[in-house]
């Protein structure tokens, strides 16, 4: 979903958690991770058990080098959805390996 499309959905359906998640994905695709975090936080505020938004929020925190917040999201996600938590763990591990290879 493009950023303008996501924004239209938000203005029309502002209480839909998935639209905030989609908006976050659009921002993340543009490397606007601070904006992505805000959108994912809205999705989680609307539905605290929305595991996909927690996973995406953790990934955005990782992109911002905020390990503390990312680990907090991982801990929440582990309680909500073991599969999503495992996916997140693999993504974190993969990014650490990639980061280490460029040093």
Image: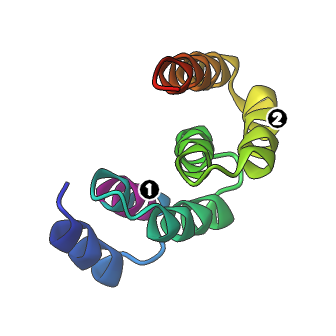
* x and y percentages locating residue 6 in the rendered image: 26, 67
Of the numbered discs 1 and 2, the one sitting upstream in the chain is 1
* Residue located 46% across and 62% down the image: 36
Say whether residue 18 is magenta: no
Label 1, on which residue?
21
Q: Which residues are magenta?
A: 20-26
Which color scheme did the rendering employ for the protein? rainbow
Q: Position of residue 99 (x, y in %)?
A: 52, 27
Determine the main secondary structure of the stretch shown in magenta.
helix
Which image quadrant for residue 43?
Answer: bottom right
The crowd level at tag 2 (other Cα within 10 Å; few <14, some 14-19, many 20+) is few
Q: Position of residue 101 (x, y in %)?
A: 49, 17
Reading the image, the residue beneath label 2 is: 75
Label 1: how many residues lie within 10 Å, few (<14), some (14-19) or many (20+)? many
Query: Under tag 2, what secondary structure?
Result: helix
Q: Is residue 35 left or right of residue 2?
A: right
Q: Is residue 49 above or below residue 83?
A: below
- Determine the image quadrant of residue 30: bottom left
Is residue 25 shown in magenta?
yes
Front: mark 1 or 2: 2
Name the secondary structure under disc 1. Answer: helix
Residue 58 position, x and y percent, is 62, 44
In the depicted structure, whether residue 55 falls above or below residue 53: above
Nearest the camera: 12 or 43?
Answer: 43
Q: Nearer the viewer, residue 89 or 31?
A: 31
């Amino acid at each position: 979903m493009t950023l303008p499309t996501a924004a239209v959905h938000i203005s029309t359906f502002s209480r839909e958690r998935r639209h905030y998640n989609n908006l976050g994905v659009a921002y993340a695709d543009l490397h606007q991770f601070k904006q992505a975090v805000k959108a994912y936080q809205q999705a989680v505020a609307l539905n605290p058990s929305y595991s996909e938004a927690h996973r995406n929020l953790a990934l955005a925190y990782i992109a911002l080098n905020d390990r503390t917040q990312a680990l907090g999201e991982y801990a929440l996600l582990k309680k909500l959805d073991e599969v999503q938590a495992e996916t997140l763990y693999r993504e974190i591990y993969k990014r650490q390996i990639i980061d280490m290879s460029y040093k």
